[in-house]
Structures are given as structure tokens and as C-alpha cells.
């Protein structure tokens, strides 16, 4: 079976499959790539955009991360709703209307500026630093850690899934806010995807392993960067555990293509939904 690593990227055959699996209809197509932290979704998205360009298509990539609320907006939510909303990432911390407006403008053949988020500054870049496509797009590759994930049932929220929820959200205010947002705001965004791929890890435990590797790589690349120790990393990942587990439960049945990965991010299986 073909393999995938962050260094080597994904097999070219898999990248070609992503392009070939898109509907043959006029206008821009949107390929969604969903994958938990560290799964390689950004790597695959970049490869698909590059391959599309080599095939003569006008293509661009966007991340759900590019639509985080600004730092000021999140701090306001933290002050008025729950302190955990200061941390970007969970549902309810994205500017979904901006994402919808951007994708709809691209679909209409316009070339709007594409938002970008500066993770080091923990804030959205000023609009003057956003870039525009040079011509209308044939393909938008949209990747994100929770793309396509549906909300949980209300009763599932009663029991904390980790120490973060138990200690910092004992009454469930934060997780209910996030789940309500996921139920209310995000389905419209998921509906913009023409195809959805899910990079499936072997289990949630792989997220900590992969995110630890990312942290080590960032430290090596920027020696002066202040990194997270294991305890801080586990707390950080705790913000995403509930929705990540919901992704593992639901996306194998919802995605058009499922790419199964082992702990080394090697591809051990692929399944495409029959339509």
C-alpha cells in the first residue's frame, strides 16, 4: 500500500484521484479535506492545488483556520460567554458568514481576497494582506480539522470527555455553546462542499502523538519559540477532543472518500462512497 508522510507528502496517485473524483459540471468545484490535528490535511491540500495548476486549472487553497474570529472577538466571547472561547479552533470561534461569503463569491466567478490568519500573532491578518486569485477558480481546496462534522445530541454533552471539560467547564456552558454553533451555523458551510475527503487516524490517541511531533518540528525550526510542555499540550488538545471524537464516529459514513492512516501516517486503506 502507498504511504504518506509529512516529509514526502502523499502519493501522486492519491492526489490524481482527488482531482478525478470531482463532479464534471461547469463552474468552480469545492473539494473539502477533513482531518484531525496532524493528519496531513494541509499537505494533501497543497499537493492537490499544485497538481490542479499543473493540469491547467485555476486552483487555490483555503483553510477553515483562515476564518478564525479575530483575537478581539474571541476575547469578547471569553468575557461574556466562557473563558475557554479565547482559544481558537472549536466550533463557535470561526467567522462562518465570512467563509460563506468568500466561497459564494468564488463560486460566482469573482476573485475576492482570500482571508489569512497569523497563528503566531493569534489574529487575522489585515485585509490589505490578503491575496486575490489572479483569475476565476476552477477548484477550491478547503481543508479543516472538523469539516463536515455534525453536532452531537444534547444528552451527550452531560458527561465531560476529559480533564479540561471537567475542571474548566463543569456546568457544560462552553461545550454547549460550541455544539449549538456546530448545529446552527456550520451545516450551511458544509453544504458548499462538492466532495468531502476524511483522513482517518487509527484513533484519537494518534492526535497527541502527531501534535507532539508538530510541536517538536516547530521548536527545531524556531529555537527561540516558546513551546508547550506535555501537560500544556494535553490541555490544548483537550479543546478539540469532543468534536474530534464526533468526527471519528460520523465522518467515515459521511465522507465521499475515506483515507485510513496508521500511527505513522501511512495509508492502510481507501474507500470511496458509491453514488
Image: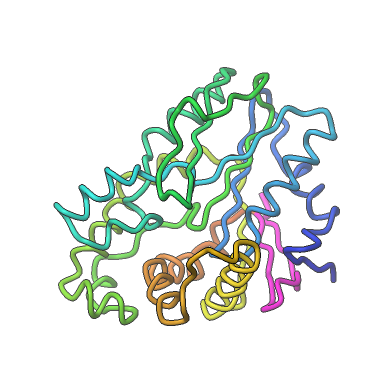
170 sits left or right of 44 in the view: left
- Residue plotted at (20% across, 47% down): 76
Q: Which residue: 54% across, 64% down?
A: 224
Closest to the observer: 260 or 155? 260
**Residue at figure coordinates x 48%, y 43% from the top left:** 117
Please say which color scheme the image uses.
rainbow
57 in magenta: no
Tell me if residue 156 comes above or below residue 41 in the rendering: below
- Residue 51 placed where, x, y %? 80, 41
The image quarter containing residue 19 is top right
Q: Is residue 52 left or right of residue 146?
A: right
Q: Nearer the viewer, residue 219 or 230?
A: 219
Q: How many numbered badges does the structure rendering display?
A: 0
- As displayed, is residue 212 above or below residue 137? below
For the record, the magenta segment spans 257-275
Task: Point out residue 16 in the picture as x, y percentages from the top left corner.
Answer: 82, 47
Q: Quadrant of residue 168?
A: bottom left
Q: Quadrant of the N terminus?
A: bottom right
Where residue 208 sits: x, y (%)?
53, 77
Which residue is located at x 45 percent, y 37 percent? 125
User: Does residue 273 show up magenta in the picture?
Assistant: yes
Amino acid at each position: 500500500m502507498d504511504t504518506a508522510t509529512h516529509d514526502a507528502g502523499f502519493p501522486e496517485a492519491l492526489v490524481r484521484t482527488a482531482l478525478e473524483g470531482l463532479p464534471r459540471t461547469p463552474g468552480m468545484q469545492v473539494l473539502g479535506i477533513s482531518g484531525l490535528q496532524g493528519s496531513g490535511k494541509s499537505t494533501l491540500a497543497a499537493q492537490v492545488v499544485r497538481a490542479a495548476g499543473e493540469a491547467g486549472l485555476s486552483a487555490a487553497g483555503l483553510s477553515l483556520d483562515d476564518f478564525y474570529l479575530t483575537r478581539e472577538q474571541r476575547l469578547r466571547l471569553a468575557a461574556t460567554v466562557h473563558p475557554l472561547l479565547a482559544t481558537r479552533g472549536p466550533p463557535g470561534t470561526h467567522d462562518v458568514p465570512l467563509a460563506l461569503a468568500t466561497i459564494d463569491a468564488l463560486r460566482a466567478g469573482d476573485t475576492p481576497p482570500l482571508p489569512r490568519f497569523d497563528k503566531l500573532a493569534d489574529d487575522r491578518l489585515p485585509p490589505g494582506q490578503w491575496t486575490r486569485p489572479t483569475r476565476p477558480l476552477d477548484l477550491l481546496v478547503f481543508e479543516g480539522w472538523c469539516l463536515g462534522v455534525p453536532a452531537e445530541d444534547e444528552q451527550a454533552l452531560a458527561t465531560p470527555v476529559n480533564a479540561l471539560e471537567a475542571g474548566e467547564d463543569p456546568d457544560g456552558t462552553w461545550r454547549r455553546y460550541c455544539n449549538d454553533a456546530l448545529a446552527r451555523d456550520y451545516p450551511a458551510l458544509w453544504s458548499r462542499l462538492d466532495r468531502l475527503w476524511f483522513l482517518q487516524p487509527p484513533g484519537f490517541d494518534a492526535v497527541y502523538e502527531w501534535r507532539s511531533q508538530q510541536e517538536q518540528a516547530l521548536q527545531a525550526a524556531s529555537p527561540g519559540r516558546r513551546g508547550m510542555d506535555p501537560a500544556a499540550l494535553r490541555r490544548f488538545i483537550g479543546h478539540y477532543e469532543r468534536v474530534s471524537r464526533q468526527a471519528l464516529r460520523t465522518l467515515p459514513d459521511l465522507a465521499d472518500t475515506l483515507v485510513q492512516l496508521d500511527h505513522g501516517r501511512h495509508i492502510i486503506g481507501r474507500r470511496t462512497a458509491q453514488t
